[in-house]
Structure formats: C-alpha cells, structure tokens
Amino acid sequence: MNLTPFSARDADRLLVLIDAGSLISAFQPGLSFEYQYTLNLILTDYAGHPDSVMLPLLEWVQVNQFELLSNSARRGEIAFEADILANDAMDLSIKLPLTERVVVTAKDGGGYHMRRPPEFE
C-alpha cells in the first residue's frame, strides 16, 4: 500500500504494527484458516494533511477489505488518533481491522498448497 510520498521518502518514520491478532479455523475438513488482526499504521512527525493519507487508504480498503465500507455495521471500524506535535507536524495512528483468508489444499504426493484468494472470492 503506497499511502503517500511520505512512505517512500521517510520510510523510517512509518511504523507498521499488528495488534490483537487471531487465527481462525472452522474445524471443517481441510486446513483452511483466516488471520484476523488490527493493522496499526503510525506516521511519526507527519507534516502533510491527513486527507493525503486517508484517500489512498480508502482506495486500498475499497479493493482489499471492501466490507469495511459496504457493511453499515462495520463502517466506523477504521479508527485514527493524532498527536499534534506542532502547527506543522503530528504523529498519526490509523487502525484497520483486517482479515486474510488462506485456502489450503492437499497436493498429490503429499504436502499442501496455500493461496490467499481475492477478497471478493
């Protein structure tokens, strides 16, 4: 995800954390599972406008986690906090509740094949 030119120019000030992760399996035949976690993006000493981060973030969510926008019960789950450091700088934390499905199938001759299907599949 390319948030803004900030992430390329000042990568050392972009922190990517995973909070509250869970591994979900339905205990059905097969070993497919899902990761559920909160992605915490922290931009430190950010001097741009928050809109410059939120717009590309929403574009990414629309493609990769669209239920956060389409499901009215989940629309408020994208959260953020800002610590204003000065008139032209802030620490910005954005929290996204994400899921990643992993489909596991047995290979002929042993072993497993794992794939991450697109969100809409």
Image: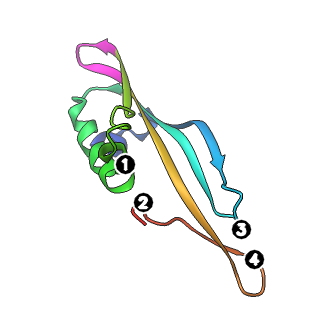
Q: Which residue is mark 2?
A: 119
Tell me which label, 2 or 1, sits earlier in the chain.
1
Q: Nearer the viewer, mark 1 or mark 4?
A: 1
Callouts 2 and 3 close, C-beta under 8 Å: no
Q: As displayed, is residue 18 above or below residue 65?
A: above
Q: Residue at x 42, y 60 (%)?
A: 119
| Tag of residue 111 | 4
Q: Which residues are magenta?
A: 84-91
Q: Which residue is mark 1?
A: 67
| Tag of residue 16 | none
Q: CA distance from mark 4 to mark 2?
A: 25 Å
Q: Left or right: 27 with respect to 49?
A: right
Q: Residue 77 appears at what percent x and percent y?
A: 39, 33
Three-letter code for the amino acid on which mark 1 is drawn: Glu
Tell me which label, 2 or 3, sits earlier in the chain.
3
Few, some or many C-alpha atoms within 10 Å of disc 3 (few <14, some 14-19, many ≥20)? few
Q: Residue at x 59, y 50 (%)?
A: 35
Tell me which label, 1 or 4, sits earlier in the chain.
1
